[in-house]
C-alpha cells in the first residue's frame, strides 16, 4: 500500500474543493490509501476574516477535516499540497507548517516521497505559476520528488477558456471577487494529479 496525504489550506473553499478532487483521483489507483488534512488557521486571521460571510461558510464546510500533524507527513509515501496564492507565493500558514518540520528535514523523513502542488488565485496572472514554482524550492530541501501535470494527460491546459492548470500544478481561478468556484475541467486536472502522485509514490516506495 502507498499512503497519500492531501494537505491543504483554504480560506474560501476553492483549494478545499480541489483537494477533495485530488483525493478522488488517488482513490482510483489500486493499492493506495488517502488522507485529507488541513493546515490550521492563525487565530488572528480567523478573528479578522470571520467578519466575512464567505469565509465563515467555507470554514464551516471544512469543519470535519482534521488538522495536519507532523506524523501525517511521516505517514505519507506521497503528498499533494493545496497551496493558495498570497502575493505570488505560498501563504504564511503553509510556510509555518514547513518551518515546524525541521526535525523531519534533519532526519530525512520526507526524502524520496512523491509530491505535487495544487494552487489558486483570483486571476490567471495572479500568481498561479509563481506560487507553484516557489513552492518547489522548500519541497526540494526536504528531498521530495516533484510530480508535474503534463500536457498529454491534460488537454484542458491547451485551451484559452480562463481556467487554471499548468505543467507545474493543478489550479483554479477564483475570480476577482472570489465567487467563482472550481469548474469541472479544473477538478479533473486536480484528480489526475492526485492519481499521478499515487502512481509515482507506489513506484518509488521501497526503491529510494
Image: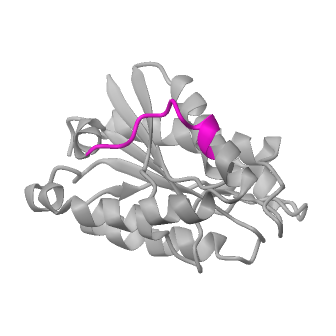
Give the quarter of the figure containing the N terminus: top left
- The residue drawn where x is 77% and y is 71% is 124
Left or right: residue 10 versus residue 115 is right
Residue 28 position, x and y percent, is 56, 23
Q: Visible in this render: residue 67?
A: yes
- In the orientation shown, which residue stands out farthest toward the top? 30
Q: Which residues are magenta?
A: 59-69
Q: Is residue 164 magenta?
A: no
- The residue drawn where x is 20% and y is 46% is 208
Q: Visible in this render: residue 18?
A: no
Residue 71 position, x and y percent, is 22, 40
- The residue drawn where x is 65% and y is 70% is 128
- In the orientation shown, which residue stands out farthest toward the right? 161
Write down the quadrant of residue 121 in the picture: bottom right
Left or right: residue 135 versus residue 2 is right
Q: Is residue 62 magenta?
A: yes
Left or right: residue 83 versus residue 172 is left
Relative to 100, does residue 115 appear above or below in the rendering? above
- In the orientation shown, which residue stands out farthest toward the left? 107
Write down the quadrant of residue 173 in the picture: bottom right
Between 135 and 197, the one lying in front of the other is 135
Write down the quadrant of residue 120 in the picture: bottom right
Residue 64 position, x and y percent, is 51, 29
Amino acid at each position: 500500500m502507498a499512503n497519500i496525504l492531501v494537505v491543504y489550506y483554504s480560506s474560501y473553499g476553492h483549494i478545499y474543493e480541489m483537494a477533495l478532487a485530488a483525493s478522488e483521483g488517488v482513490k482510483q489507483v489500486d493499492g493506495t490509501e488517502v488522507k485529507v488534512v488541513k493546515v490550521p488557521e492563525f487565530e488572528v486571521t480567523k478573528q479578522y476574516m470571520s467578519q466575512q460571510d464567505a469565509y465563515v461558510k467555507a470554514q464551516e464546510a471544512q469543519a470535519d477535516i482534521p488538522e495536519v500533524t507532523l506524523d501525517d507527513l511521516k505517514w505519507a509515501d506521497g503528498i499533494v499540497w493545496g497551496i493558495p496564492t498570497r502575493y505570488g507565493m505560498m501563504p504564511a500558514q503553509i510556510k509555518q507548517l514547513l518551518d515546524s518540520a525541521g526535525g523531519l528535514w534533519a532526519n530525512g523523513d520526507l526524502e524520496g516521497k512523491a509530491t505535487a502542488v495544487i494552487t489558486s488565485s483570483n486571476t490567471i496572472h495572479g500568481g498561479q505559476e509563481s506560487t507553484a514554482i516557489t513552492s518547489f524550492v522548500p519541497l526540494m530541501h526536504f528531498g521530495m520528488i516533484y510530480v508535474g501535470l503534463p500536457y498529454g494527460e491534460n488537454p484542458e491546459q491547451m485551451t484559452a477558456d480562463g481556467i487554471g492548470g499548468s505543467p507545474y500544478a493543478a489550479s483554479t481561478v477564483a475570480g476577482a471577487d472570489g465567487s467563482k468556484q472550481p469548474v469541472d475541467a479544473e477538478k479533473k486536472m486536480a484528480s489526475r494529479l492526485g492519481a499521478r502522485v499515487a502512481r509515482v509514490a507506489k513506484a518509488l516506495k521501497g526503491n529510494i
